Image: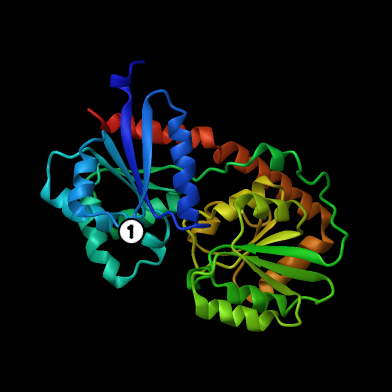
Amino acid sequence: MTNANIKRVLLLAPLSPGSGNAATAFRLTDGLRHSSQIFVDCISVDTPRIESDSLLDSIRQYDAVLALHAYRAGRLLTSIYQNNSDLPPLILIFAGTDLHSCEPEWLPTIEQIVPKARGLVCFSFEWKKYAENIYKNLLTCCITVIPQSVQMSPSISERLPPSTSFSSLPKTIIWAGGIREVKDPLLAIRIMSHLPDHEFQLIIVGYEADPSLVNVIHSSCLGSNITLIGGQSTDYVHELMCSAFACLNTSINEGMCLVILEAMALRLPVVARRNIGNISIIRDGQTGLLYETAEQAAECLLQLAMDTKLRETVIQQAAEQVKTFHNPESESTAYQNLILSLIK
């Protein structure tokens, strides 16, 4: 295939270190670059600040634009796509917080950019249904469901735990995510108050997006079985997961949580808060355990410690689900097909 036939795609996305959006953007960029038909440039929506005129000139050089996060990417694109009719097709990817944690001041931007999209993507059918209901009068195209995928380094995959038994004490629970309100790390601390100190320890891994929350966590960690280790590389988090007892998710809501999918791929049982994003990938008692209160979460963790058969079931079925429905090749192929279908 000649260079003239290769389609150029601009991916605009939030690229904050350690964020799920950044992980998604880098994974999509890497996957699409392996295509013989598409070349991708990935640009942050946050830094450096892009001037509208400069971005317009850049966009004209591409055959399509992928925009991750309807508000954060949308605020750069709204005026451009409102005032110009000869631009490449825009594909808007709902990232999560632009649906479940949408701030009132975000709505005007989202409501202006959604009708300009020639392609719309949600990570699950649950979020597709939600978006269709919320924006039913604004949609000018169908919403495509493309699940998030999991990309593990070969060195990590080779170190998967050989057994589902877990007898060491204390049992390490991993909580990973940005330290911010929607992730509700304080719930993890309340959950630990319902567990025996000598049997369980909690490691909180995450970049410190909300200083006030970080201060509360630090005060809760003094002399306890809870440790905050700050933001870490993905490979380091995966190393922790390989020797941990369970992964704990406390998010008020999720788009499609990469940490959960990574834990499932690494054969680490997941105990997750019941919400729209989490029920789209976790079947309670089969691919993970779901809870609604701190007491229920503690019961789930104790159940995993006592019931070897349940632990085995959760590990096996979760790993199989990720392998079947969340592989990078299927994800990149789906995006490639969507992009090429919209380019004339």
Residue at image coords 70%, 39%: 155
* Residue 137 at least partly seen: no
Residue at image coords 20%, 57%: 112
The colouring scheme, among rainbow, by chain, secondary structure or one colour, is rainbow
Residue at image coords 28%, 20%: 4
129 left or right of 199?
Answer: left
The percent position of residue 141, horizontal first and vertical second, equals: 25, 43
Q: Quadrant of residue 341?
A: top left
Which quarter of the figure is the N terminus placed in? top left
Q: Quadrant of residue 274?
A: bottom right
Residue at image coords 59%, 71%: 292
Q: Quadrant of residue 142?
A: top left
Residue holding disc 1: 72
* Closer-to-camera residue (22/326): 22
The percent position of residue 177, horizontal first and vertical second, equals: 56, 62
* Closer-to-camera residue (25/95): 25
The vertical placement of 268 against 35, above or below, is: below
* Closer-to-camera residue (100/136): 100
* Residue 105 at least partly seen: yes
The vertical placement of 235 against 198, above or below, is: above
Which quarter of the figure is the C terminus placed in? top left
The percent position of residue 50, horizontal first and vertical second, equals: 27, 54
